[in-house]
Image (cartoon, rainbow, N blue to C red):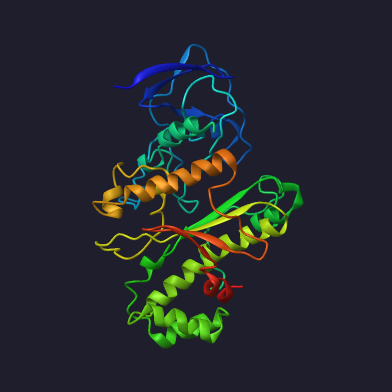
Amino acid sequence: MAAEVIALTAQGRLRGARDGQALRFLGVPYAEPPETAGRFGVSAAPGRWNGIREALSYGATSPQPDRGVTLIPEPIIAGDNELNLNVFTPDLGAARLPVLVWIHGGGFFGGCNASPWYRGGPFARDAGALTALLSSGIRLPWAPWTDGDVVTEEPVQAAASPRHREVAVLAGATAHEFNMAWLPADWITRDMAAEGLAKAGVPAPLAAIYLDRAGPRPGGAVGQAVTDRTFRVPAQHLAAAKAEAGGSAYVYDFRWAPPAGPLAGLAFHCLDVPFFFDTLGEPGVTGAAGPAPPGALAADMHAALVRFVTDSAPGWEAYGAGRRPVMVFAVPSGVQEDPLEMERTAWT
């Protein structure tokens, strides 16, 4: 049974709930409704309220069409102010705790703030105990751009800047982010895939590796190339830029895949989320990961992220100084030296 709890904030009092070892406050406004400044105007800080504001249920979701069934459970909640957030904390009054800010995905056209996969209770629990993303990749039509005001620098530029040397970076991806989108493409022939890879600038010997790994379904080579170009190689570039600037950067590659089901053998997009959040028991996880996703892997990944949030180091050697150590999350997991050399060379 969840017990209610009252928190005092700069804007007024909030009624949340204790659930297990964490406190949760849901739908907390961090700005005035968009109508106040105009839908595309600069948001304004929220005003104060009188009495106690209820923070027991999720707030409004950003406006979007109902996409029906999605990979991650993403309920759409109607309301006046989607500028809200959810706060999970081990206790009230605790000072100088590490903070994890989670910005949900959705390609800048979907996604929600109320997915059970994003519940922060395990982070609140464990943070309290320890204190102590072909040639141009996937184009997202609503992606942010460097405007010099809100987004002041490109990510790699920011990582390479001495001004941000003290900010550590943890970057990685799943091994088969968007391969599943190309699996049904039986119309793609080996010659078509080879021509596409060549036009994208992949050297012929490396294109041959992509095609050989894809086996009898050349569309798989296209899917893997898109995954590497868009996610896995940029993660390495980001880490390398940070390391060359004298900062700390760590890289992972998530390779565990469900052994059965429609996506068997694929470490697909977002599969790493419930492992990092340690939320394997939440709705929708077994539908994506199978009936018995490995709890030990979730425990290891979650602990690594907690260590990074707390101490800026996840527990393996940093990228740089002529070394490219990558934590490969699988069963078993382990650090490998430059396991993505082929992919990095193909897209550099």
In this picture, residue 273 sits left or right of residue 346: left
User: For the point 45% across and 34% down, which residue is it?
Assistant: 126
User: For the point 71% across and 47% down, which residue is it?
Assistant: 164
In this picture, residue 28 sits left or right of residue 31: left
Q: Give the x, y percent position of residue 258.
A: 30, 59
Quadrant showing the N terminus:
top left
Q: Is residue 123 visible?
A: yes
**184 vs 64, nearest the viewer:** 184
Image height check: is 234 above or below 104?
A: below
The mark tally for this picture is: 0
In this picture, residue 150 sits left or right of residue 265: right
Image height check: is 251 above or below 222?
A: above
User: For the point 57% across and 69% down, which residue is it?
Assistant: 136
**347 vs 134, nearest the viewer:** 347
Instruction: Choose top left, top right, bottom left or bottom right for residue 255.
Output: bottom left
Q: Give the x, y percent position of residue 185.
A: 34, 75
**195 vs 124, nearest the viewer:** 124
Image height check: is 220 above or below 112?
A: below
Instruction: Choose top left, top right, bottom left or bottom right for residue 334.
Output: bottom left
Q: Give the x, y percent position of residue 313.
A: 58, 46
| Residue projecting furthest to the top | 51
Q: Give the x, y percent position of residue 146.
A: 67, 53
Image height check: is 37 above or below 228?
A: above
Quadrant showing the C terminus:
bottom right
